[in-house]
Amino acid sequence: MKHLPLTIVGPINATRPVMVLVGALLVFGERLNLWQWIGVALAVMSFVMLSKSGKKEGIDFKHDKWIYFLVLAAMLGAVSGLYDKYLMASPADGGVGLDRMLVQSWYNIYQMAMMGAMLIFLWWPSHKKTTPFHWDWSVIFISLFLSAADFVYFYALSMPGAMISIVSMVRRGSVIVSFLFGAALFHEKNLKAKAFDLALVLLGMIFLYIGSK
């Protein structure tokens, strides 16, 4: 995210549900109707068009290593989403039926351990030259917003009959926030083309919603 425009990062992350969909079909046997398939197709189309928009800013999707890292992060996020479904879905739905608060509590503990290791071994040895620490209240807000978002997400997954393919797609609606933030605060370029790509993602979500009714 640090090395890419936020208006590129958001829509790429918004394609993560497509990966989740494939896993949901293969692992949990979820089945989509015609409306939902149209929604998925629109999301894939937006990714292809987004790559063309990125080239106008000098970002070549085939040769930019940060794009590959971002795609890898999206893939790992998709695997995480499928694992969340497995942990909280009832045994009748192919899961183990763990309590959502139990899952979130352990997630926070693991996150603290992993971030602590990153801080000690990667950041601390060279932080004075690269990224010296400056206190800001946004540090606390990151934790609060992340925990609140995860609570709602886990709650949705724990509901009977919840489909990870649909929950994941709706969750990526956060692309609207990142896009508006990148446009208003960072004044990023080529917004018209990216707005059209974003519109395809949102239209895909509308089709998913109709198909879920």
Image (tube, rainbow, N blue to C red):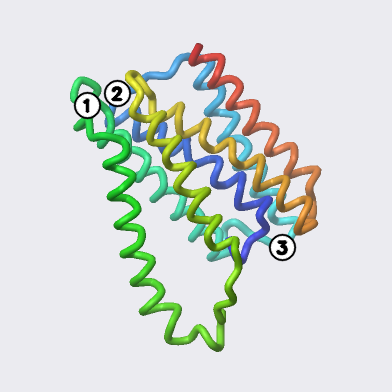
* Dot 3 and dot 2 residues touching (CB under 8 Å): no
The residue identified by callout 3 is 58
Q: Which mark is residue 133?
A: none
Numbered disc 2: secondary structure: loop
The residue identified by callout 2 is 29
The Cα–Cα distance between marks 1 and 3, rounded to whole angstroms, is 45 Å
The Cα–Cα distance between marks 1 and 2, rounded to whole angstroms, is 9 Å
Residue 53: image x %, image y %? 72, 49
Q: Amino acid at mark 2?
A: Gly
Query: Measuring 45% from the left and 35% from the top, which residue is drawn there?
Result: 152
Q: Amino acid at mark 3?
A: Gly
Labels 1, 2: front one: 1
Labels 1, 3: front one: 1
Rendered image quadrant of residue 199: top right
Mark 1, Cα crowd under 10 Å, few <14 / some 14-19 / many 20+, is some
Mark 3, Cα crowd under 10 Å, few <14 / some 14-19 / many 20+, is few
Residue 19 falls left or right of residue 52? left
The Cα–Cα distance between marks 3 and 2, rounded to whole angstroms, is 41 Å
Q: 176 or 23, which lies in front?
A: 176
In primary-sequence order, the first of circles 3 and 2 is 2
In primary-sequence order, the first of circles 1 and 2 is 2
Residue 198 falls left or right of residue 191? left
Residue 13 falls left or right of residue 19? right
* Dot 1 and dot 2 residues touching (CB under 8 Å): yes
Numbered disc 1: secondary structure: loop
In primary-sequence order, the first of circles 1 and 3 is 3
Residue 2: image x %, image y %? 60, 65
Rendered image quadrant of residue 111: bottom left
Labels 3, 2: front one: 2
Q: Which mark is residue 94?
A: 1
